[in-house]
Amino acid sequence: MAKIKAALTSDEFISEHRASPKDFTRCRTLTFATLVSSLARGMTRSLQGELDDFFGRLANRAHLVRAVSKSAFSQARQKLLPSAFRALNELLLSQWEQSVTVPRWHGFRLLAGDATTLRLPTLPEVIDEFGMHGDRWGGQTPLGPGLWPDGRDQRLARTRRSVGIEYPGTGDVGGQLGACAC
């Protein structure tokens, strides 16, 4: 956890994962680390209730603390790039893999694969964003982000932990996920 805390306060990490060079430069209540930590907690109640609870716990208080408004939180969230969570996930996974024995089968990590076919609505803004491709009935349908040309979304997960990982392959083999020696 020390490496994650160090990353969240590192000027290099912050500059790499903010929307503008001006973002997260002043000393505010919602620092980069505080914003990422509050988002990583997950939220089950109203936004303001979650924020009050988070800042109450941060201040070691038994009661809720109104430190920031939901509007300020939403504005700060717009300044954070999603790549921050991918980078933190990679850091967390590398720490985890160094601390445990990764299960192997004949020298390979055992991974589980799953796929689904996504059908996107044929709205002009969807077509502009993702483009079109031919479907199996001879028509045209929008192609979703990161999908294979036939509209399938494929993911791999480590077995026993159900941790999603990026698929390192570039295509499918015989309509199934290609073999992966990760």
Image (spheres, rainbow, N blue to C red):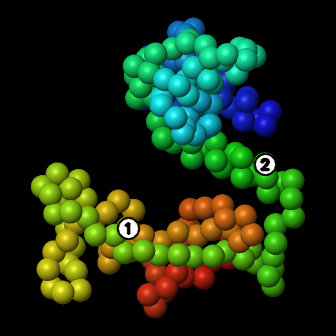
Residue occupied by mark 2? 95
Sooner in the amino-acid sequence: mark 2 or mark 1: 2
Q: As drawn, is 26 to the left or to the right of 126?
A: right
Q: As drawn, is 53 to the left or to the right of 61?
A: left
Q: As drawn, is 11 to the left or to the right of 134?
A: right
Q: Determine the image quadrant of residue 21.
A: top left
Question: Camera-side residue: 172 or 121?
Answer: 121
What's under tag 2, amino acid-wise?
Answer: Gln
The residue located at (22%, 66%) in the rendering is 142
Q: Position of residue 100 (x, y in %)?
A: 86, 59
Q: Position of residue 179 (x, y in %)?
A: 60, 82
Question: Camera-side residue: 71 or 36?
Answer: 71
Give the secondary structure at mark 1: loop
Residue 13 visible in the snapshot:
no
Residue 147 marker: 1
Q: Position of residue 42 (x, y in %)?
A: 58, 40
Q: Determine the image quadrant of residue 70.
A: top left
Say which quadrant the C terminus sits in.
Answer: bottom right
Q: Residue furthest bottom?
A: 174
What's under tag 1, amino acid-wise?
Answer: Leu
Question: Camera-side residue: 79 or 17?
Answer: 79
Gap between marks 2 and 1, in whole Å?
29 Å
